[in-house]
Image (spheres, rainbow, N blue to C red):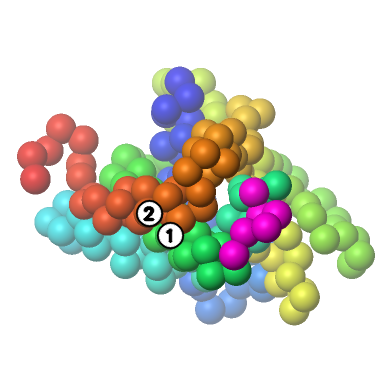
Amino acid sequence: MFKRTLIFVFTLVAAMFVQAANVDKTQPYSMMKQVSETAFTRLKAEQEAIHHHPEYLKEIVEQELMPYVNEQYAALKLLGPNLKGAKREDVATFITAFRAYLVSAYAQVLTQYSNQIIEFEPEQAVSDDKRITSVKVDIIDTPRPNIKLEFKLRKEKNGEWQVFDMIAEGVSLLSSKQSEWSGKIRQDGILAVANELQQLADQPIRFEGKAQ
């Protein structure tokens, strides 16, 4: 169940942040709704190209998702206490590797796309002084049970919102990755984990059950 949840988390994230001409990024609710429609349309239209060349999904993620994700803020939160005393260049290397890992991970799970339906919570007002907000959605995957998601967004200095965390069925992906990697960071160092992330990022995109 949790594996399926993660698949749809990443699928929705990649779908929600496609670049769209008339999307107001200062309004988190309307932004997420508008870009999701555009992204699912693109994914559906380009399935032939994606199946012919799975690595193309990385291009889609780079173009449509990453400009709307604050990977630096997420990476720094993930490092948490391990930032103390860390070299600036090591942290920069970690952020770069973490970003590459996200691109690859999002691309891989997008191979699971199959016309899922999204239902957003009713739009709620966000005060001007609020820096963090969340948007709740349901993934409709009939006949399976709905998947409840919550996206955490942070307001940047320019007034635009970016995602930094996703909560699937009450589990924060950022917190879960922090628990997974923090021990290794303490034991082996930031660069060792950065190297591991880069190796994961360099793995080819594969469709499940398909020989490469």
Residue under the image location 42 percent in, 28 percent down: 4
Along the viewing direction, whichever of 22 and 167 lies nearer the viewer: 167
Residue under the image location 91 percent in, 65 percent down: 129
Residue 163 showing in the rendered view: no
Q: Amino acid at mark 1?
A: Ala
Q: Are marks 2 and 1 in contact (CB under 8 Å)?
A: yes
Mark 2 vs mark 1, CA separation in Å: 7 Å
145 relative to 83, above or below: above
Neighbor class of circle 1 (other Cα within 10 Å; few <14, some 14-19, many 20+) is many
Q: Earlier in the sequence, mark 2 or mark 1?
A: 1
Along the viewing direction, whichever of 89 and 128 lies nearer the viewer: 89
Residue 181 in picture, x, y percent from top left: 52, 39
Q: Residue 97 got which mark?
A: 1
Neighbor class of circle 2 (other Cα within 10 Å; few <14, some 14-19, many 20+) is some
Residue 146 in picture, x, y percent from top left: 54, 26
Q: In the rendered image, which residue does mark 2 sit on? A: 195
In this picture, which residue range is highlighted in magenta?
82-87
SS of the residue at dot 2?
helix
Residue under the image location 37 percent in, 48 percent down: 196
Q: Nearer the viewer, mark 2 or mark 1?
A: 2
Residue 138 in picture, x, y percent from top left: 59, 36
